[in-house]
Amino acid sequence: MSGCADSMLFTPEYPDIKRKNSLTFSSPSFIIDCPFYENAIEARDRIQCQEYDLLLPGPCNLHCKYCFSEWGKEPQNSPCPKKSFDDITDIIRQNISAGLRKVRIKSNGEPTLYPRFWDLIDFINLHGGQTEVYTNSFNNTAELSRMFAAKNVNIVTKLDALTPEINDYLTGVTGSFTIQYKAVFNFIEAGYTMDGPKLGLHAIICKQNYGQLPRFWRFCRDLDIIPYFQIPAPPPNRNNPYFRELCVDRVAIHKLFEQILRIDKEEYGNSC
């Protein structure tokens, strides 16, 4: 696999929900909650946790080439020990009572496959917390997107390329592009806007999709989606045979971010 020339890129047909140039972000980053950052130093001085990353145990429905875990099954050496649902909710309850504002739900696999996933969302909402879920959306439906929106859950969904061939190669599952691409619009149609629950789109930076990423950034900005690019890190067990094949050198990464910065400034009026 190699980077894809711009002329080969999938050309998305935007529904009537295209909302170009309505963003007002000051830098290429993920969801920015200004009141939170204004209070961050005060919270630090009080030794108060305002955000909490919850890593749920469980399997995955993809076989991503850059995955940290053992593909397609629950990792045997999880960095997070298994806890019961009562243990998890007790930790969240204590932290919220101490000032916690946001719970980021992630997983060694796919968090929505956790058996009591929706009970967990309801528990956080009941206790006044804000939930942010990182999902690959491979099991997404329009109904599922509406459920997330109704519960005011911020979403970071996944799409690693704007071409089916590259996306499916990176996820290890044929047909994943069609499902994940459709999920983006399911979320938008469910009410994910800058005035409602927030939608982020996650992609790794690798040799295979490198040539697409500037256009990928524009795709996100045009649809009021918050782009979230990530440099893959070496897996802890060092046994991923694909890692060297994926890596982009730091000079190329620096060049990419400079290009993205120019795009934000010149095309969308954003400045750092």
Image: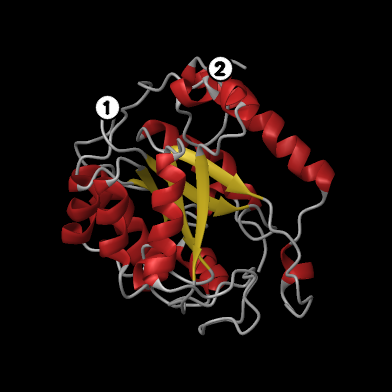
Residue 22 locus on image (x, y percent):
35, 21
Name the quadrant containing residue 89.
Answer: bottom left
Q: Please name the residue shown 56% across and 17% down the image.
A: 266
Residue 120, compared with residue 210, is above or below; it is below
Q: Nearer the viewer, residue 45 or 105?
A: 45
Q: Earlier in the sequence, mark 2 or mark 1?
A: 1
Residue 214 locus on image (x, y percent):
57, 39
Which of the image's four quarters has the N terminus? bottom right
* Total number of numbered discs in the rendering: 2
| Distance from the alpha carbon under mark 2 to that under mark 1 | 24 Å
Name the quadrant containing residue 140.
Answer: bottom left
Identify the coloring. Answer: secondary structure
Name which residue type carries label 2: Glu
Determine whether the residue tagged by mark 2 lies in a helix, strand or loop.
helix
Q: Is residue 35 left or right of residue 262?
A: left
Residue 224 seen in the figure: yes
Name which residue type carries label 1: Asp
Q: Nearer the viewer, residue 54 or 188?
A: 54
For disc 1, the marked residue is 195
Q: Is residue 161 left or right of residue 85?
A: right
Q: Nearer the viewer, residue 70 or 4?
A: 70
Q: Please name the residue shown 21% across and 40% down the image.
A: 191
Mark 1, other Cα within 10 Å: few <14 / some 14–19 / many ≥20: few
Residue 221, compared with residue 190, is above or below; it is above
Q: Please name the residue shown 29% across and 28% down the image.
A: 19
Residue 18 locus on image (x, y percent):
27, 33
Residue 244 locus on image (x, y percent):
79, 68
Mark 2, other Cα within 10 Å: few <14 / some 14–19 / many ≥20: few
The circle on residue 170 is none
Residue 43, compared with residue 256, is above or below; it is above
For disc 2, the marked residue is 266
